[in-house]
Image: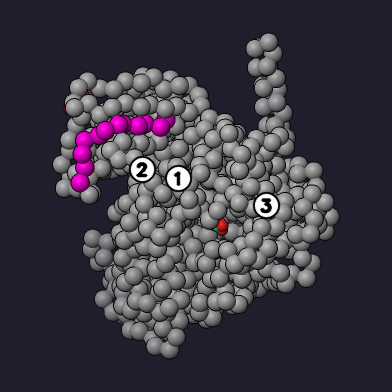
Amino acid sequence: MRKLSRRLTLVSLLFSILLAPLRTAPAADFKREVIYQIITDRFFDGSSANNNPSQSSGLYDSTKTNWRAYWGGDLAGIQQKMSYLAGMGVTAIWISPPVDNLNTNIPDGSGNPTASYHGYQARDFKRIEEHFGNSSNTWTEFDNLVTAAHQNGIKVIVDFAPNHSTQNNAGEFGALYDNGTFLGNFSSDSNGYFHHNANISGGGWDDRYQAQYYTLFDLADINQQHSTMDAYLKAAAQLFQQHGVDGFRIDAVKHLTWGWQYSFANSIYTFGDSFLFGEWFQGNTSDPLYHDSYKFANKSGISLLDFPLNTAIRNVFGSNANFSQIDSVISQEGSNFTWKEDLVTFIDNHDMARFLSVNNNNNRLHQAMAFTLTSRGIPCIYYGTEQYLHNDTSGGTDPFNRPMMTNFSTTTTAYQLVNKLSTLRRNNTAIPYGSMSQRWINNDVYIYERRFFGNVVLIAINKNETTSYNISGLNTSLPAGSYSDYLTNLLGGVSISVSSGSGGNNPVTNFTLPAHNVSVWQFTEGASTPQIGSIGPTNGQPGVKVVIGGKNFGSSTGTVKFGTTTATVNSWSPTQITVTTPSVTNGNYNVTVTNSSGQVSNAIQYTVLTAKLIPITFTVNNASPTQVGDYIFLTGNTIELGNWSTTWDGAVGPMLTPNYPNWFLVASVPAGQTIQFKFIKIAANGSVTWEAGSNHQYTVPTSGTGFVNVNWQY
Ligand code: NOJ
Ligand code: NOJ
């Protein structure tokens, strides 16, 4: 019986692999991509057959005047616009959540009946929404879209929102289905599939416990630590992987249980290559949870949307703030985020007014676009930006920031700009992998340099509409020579000449940077030593596939080492290698590439986990008394537990204390291992208090979730 069921799983796995749309290049090195964010309902109506499906009829508005209704855009529509997207230089699309959503209207905050056209109210994470696919909620149109995208060299990212199902007090009351089978709902939740706390409000947004365990805007808050919910959400994500997706934009990561997400990411990477980034909403780097956000990004395997930079971009280009604002966010985040080149950068999105609603000036839009396409991070363009799409009703905020696409012109300046800078990203490693340094700045002018070994791109932006600036004293790593504008004057670019200096400071001959100007100058070297610019995922247990991106790897296979251990190579190209995480002791490793002629690359860091991760809720009762600013942390004997670290960034935490002096936290720890751990107090001044006694010990289950409850040892 067991054999038979195993064989059946194998057969169905094989079957799903055969059905799965073909993959393009590996996704885990996403730095060379240009992402385009699509609200599927508002992009293009490719099939009228699904506009008013019977199970959710009446939610569609053919006149497209009710902004809270479905307007007909669908997966077939995106598929039909694939060459438009490819022609723009888009290499990845992020589509709004495609899963089966709420079948009724519900009142929005102001009481207006609202359909879930945006996709953030899932009822079944394993089926496709009937307005986007077909009335049987099957995957056909989704598969067709993925196949078409991959044929055009475009990767597919789905928006995945595992924090909640539908609204908890109206409509379907949070009801969840597992591929059509009813699981439960919020109002009669005898299984404990949901958290039943109040809405997050006021100071709660900055409180670690409330942010993770309270309710987001009346949306039924899923309890991911329930083993059924844990398995359901992980299986749903895997289903998307089986259907060929290359990555996930994870909704509201600040409001999901942070520790659970490490195991969620690990479950995705254990199945296969992917790129993950989350929405951690915050205004700037002074946000009370900013430190938590970069600790999460550095350790979880999930990158983030770069909200602090988004604020600075809108302030500088939209509201004419000084360039120093952008410059300081770049340097602050640069010292905090280990994997800063994986941050996803953007000008606007579906939750804020479009740029042109804030400042209706195409020059400024072009400058902001050129900035995101050339500065550090992976650029994401909100659909329609290239057509200057905006509706300014009520300041252009939600839902007016989600108009229907009307033009698909391939000749706009913005469309061409994306195309040119996408090509540069592919051809010059300084853009995806390079350092970013400020070379010249005043309130209106920002000149910054991207550099990866000998590859250099220098970008100059003057945002003043009328004043040109004389640029003197500018130094660059560009070698001596003359450089014309890579954008061929699309934004008025000028040429420069560089003479030779020393120490990477070659003087640029004084020149005039005209008003509202963007100039881009670039150089690629001919070196032959292998250069690593990327590793993804950034952690994984032995067996997990890893993608190494860079340059000069050569076409014949060489070797890849984790520390001194040679890893199995699965594929090798001059710019991308895939290897399997070797069976070495858990910990941080320097990964290096040696090409077939024996030349060794720079090293990049990778964390080898002990085993697949299982989310465990750790509770410690009656912990050491704390003052304001003191916190209890968990530390223990594997890399997942911080290897006995006693620092804020190294240990696991801070823990949460809704029932002081008891503290708890979800941490993802290695399956099947017997772990040793203790709780510590890290005081506001950094001093550490260990609990007494011998280590606690726990054997982690090999699947599901788990719970540990101990008393602080005095
Ligand atoms: C953030 C999404 O971007 C937003 O549009 C959505 O309403 C909320 N999360 C809830 O899913
Ligand atoms: C040092 C701590 O003092 C002790 O309490 C703990 O058990 C060990 N680290 C772990 O080996």
Q: Residue at x 65, y 35 (%)?
A: 183
Labelled disc at residue 682: none
The residues colored magenta run 616-627
Provide residue 254's location: percent of width, then percent of height. 44, 50
Quarter of the view holding residue 328: bottom left
Indicate yes or no whether the magenta region holds residue 625.
yes
Labelled disc at residue 658: 2
Q: How many marks?
A: 3
Provide residue 550's location: percent of width, then percent of height. 44, 46
Provide residue 315's location: percent of width, then percent of height. 41, 73
The answer to whether the residues at label 2 and label 1 have Cβ atoms under 8 Å apart is yes
- In the rendered image, the vertical position of residue 649 relative to residue 526, given as above or below: above
The answer to whether the residues at label 3 and label 2 have Cβ atoms under 8 Å apart is no
Residue 70 at least partly seen: yes
Label 2 SS = strand
Q: Which residue is mark 3?
A: 171
Q: Earlier in the sequence, mark 3 or mark 2?
A: 3
